[in-house]
Image: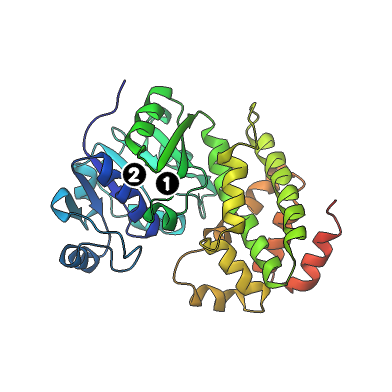
C-alpha cells in the first residue's frame, strides 16, 4: 500500500531543516512544527531557519507552520520526527491528539532517556502506534552536506516493506539515494552507538592520537557494535553496510559531527559540563552512553569502549589514563 496524505516535520534544528529541504523538493506542500513561535515568525520573515543551516532558502508559501503540537498532528498523516531524543518526552507531554493512526518516520538517532527505550518501542508502548506504522531513517547523512546538495545515502527501515519503499521514494532526490531494510531495532541501536563511539574518536583526536590509531579504533568499535546488536536483536545482518559501518565512519571522522566535536573538547581538557555549555547543538552520544550502559547491565555484552566513555563522562575519570587502558585491549 502506497502512503499518501499530508506530511509534517517536527523539529527546528539542523537535521529537521535538512529533511525539510528534501521534502520541499519532492512535495508541493508540507507542514512544519517548531516549538518556539518566535522561531516560526523569524522563518516566515527571512525565508530560512535563522538558527540552523541558514543558507537553505525555502518558499514559505508552500509550508504551513505550527508551534502547537496538537495542531500539526491533527493536520498531518505522516510525521517525520527530528526532535533530539533528550527533549522528545518534553515535546510530547503537551500532546492530546492520538498518534496511533499516523505513520511516524523517526529521524531521531538516539534513545529515550529515563525509559531507555528505542524510539520505535517508545511509540508502540506509550502511544499505541502499530509497528508497521513506524519507520526509522539511518545511514551516513550529515545535515550540513544535505544543505550543500552533496550526494548522500539514506536507509529507510520498517517492518512493512511497502511503507519503507513508499517513504524511500518520498525522500529520493538527485542528491539523496535511498534504500530499504527491515532491521528497525538494529538500525536504531547502531545510530545510538555510532554517536557514543564518535565521542571516543573525538577524545582520542583531542589527545593527539593519529589516523593509524583511529583506524584501529573504528575496527574495534564496529566489532563491539556487532556484539551488542547481535545479542539484543539476533538477525542475519551485514554490519559492514552503510547504515551500520557507514554511519559510524562519517560520525567518527567528519568535521560536522557534533559528537566528535564534543569528544575533542573533552580530550583537550574541557570538563563535560563546560563542553556541553560551549556547544550550540546537542551531542546525543552523551545521553546514549548512559542509556546503553544501563541496558547492557541486563545483557552483559563485552563493551570496553562503552565502559571507557561512560567512566569519562559520568564517573569523571581522567581521559588520558582511561583511553590508555582502553588502547591496551585493542589488536
Please report whichever mark, 2 or 1, sits nearer to the chain's N-terminal start: 2
For the point 46% across and 45% down, which residue is it?
A: 152
Q: Residue 301 sits in which quadrant? A: top right
The residue at which mark 2 appears reads as 80
Q: Residue at x 28, y 63 (%)?
A: 49
Q: Percent from the top left, x then y, of residue 10?
A: 31, 51
Q: Secondary structure at mark 2?
A: strand
Q: Is residue 109 left or right of residue 305?
A: left
Give the residue furthest to the left: 61
Relative depth, front residue between 76 and 30: 30
Task: In the rendered view, tell whether residue 40 sits above or below residue 244.
Answer: below
Q: CA distance from mark 2 to mark 1?
A: 7 Å
Label 1 crowd bin: few (<14), some (14–19), many (20+), radius 10 Å: many
Q: Nearer the viewer, residue 168 or 324?
A: 168
Residue 30, horizontal then vertical, whole percent: 21, 45
Q: Which residue is denoted by mark 1 in the rendering?
A: 107
Amino acid at each position: 500500500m502506497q502512503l499518501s496524505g499530508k506530511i509534517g516535520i517536527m523539529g527546528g534544528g539542523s537535521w529537521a531543516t535538512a529533511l525539510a529541504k528534501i521534502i520541499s523538493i519532492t512535495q508541493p506542500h508540507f507542514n512544519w512544527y517548531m516549538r518556539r513561535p518566535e522561531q516560526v515568525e523569524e522563518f516566515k520573515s527571512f525565508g530560512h531557519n535563522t538558527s540552523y543551516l541558514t543558507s537553505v532558502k525555502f518558499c514559505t508559501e508552500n509550508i504551513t507552520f505550527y508551534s502547537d503540537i496538537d495542531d500539526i498532528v491533527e493536520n498531518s498523516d505522516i510525521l517525520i520526527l527530528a526532535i533530539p531524543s533528550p527533549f522528545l518526552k518534553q515535546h510530547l507531554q503537551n500532546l492530546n491528539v492520538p498518534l496511533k493512526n499516523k505513520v511516524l518516520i523517526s529521524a531521531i538517532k538516539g534513545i529515550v532517556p529515563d525509559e531507555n527505550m528505542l524510539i520505535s518501542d517508545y511509540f508502540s508502548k506509550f502511544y499505541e502506534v502499530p509497528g508497521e506504522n513506524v519507520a526509522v531513517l539511518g545511514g551516513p547523512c550529515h545535515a550540513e552536506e544535505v544543505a550543500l546538495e552533496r550526494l548522500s545515502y539514506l536507509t529507510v527501515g520498517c517492518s512493512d516493506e511497502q511503507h519503507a519503499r513508499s517513504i524511500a521514494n518520498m525522500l529520493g532526490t538527485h542528491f539523496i539515494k535511498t534504500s530499504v531494510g527491515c532491521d528497525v531495532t538494529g538500525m536504531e541501536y547502531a545510530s545510538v552507538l555510532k554517536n557514543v563511539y564518535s565521542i571516543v574518536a573525538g577524545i582520542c583526536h583531542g589527545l593527539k592520537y593519529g589516523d593509524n590509531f583511529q583506524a584501529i579504533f573504528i575496527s574495534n568499535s564496529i566489532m563491539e557494535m556487532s556484539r551488542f546488536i547481535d545479542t539484543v536483536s539476533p538477525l542475519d545482518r551485514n554490519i559492514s553496510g552503510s547504515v551500520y559501518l557507514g554511519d559510524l565512519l562519517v560520525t567518527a571522522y567528519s568535521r560536522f559531527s557534533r559528537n566528535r566535536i564534543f569528544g575533542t573538547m573533552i580530550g583537550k581538557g574541557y570538563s563535560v559540563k563546560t563542553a556541553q555549555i560551549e556547544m550550540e547543538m546537542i551531542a546525543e552520544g552523551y545521553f546514549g552512553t548512559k542509556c546503553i550502559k544501563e541496558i547492557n547491565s541486563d545483557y552483559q555484552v563485552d563493551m570496553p569502549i562503552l565502559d571507557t566513555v561512560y567512566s569519562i563522562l559520568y564517573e569523571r575519570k581522567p581521559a588520558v589514563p582511561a583511553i590508555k587502558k582502553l588502547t591496551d585491549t585493542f589488536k
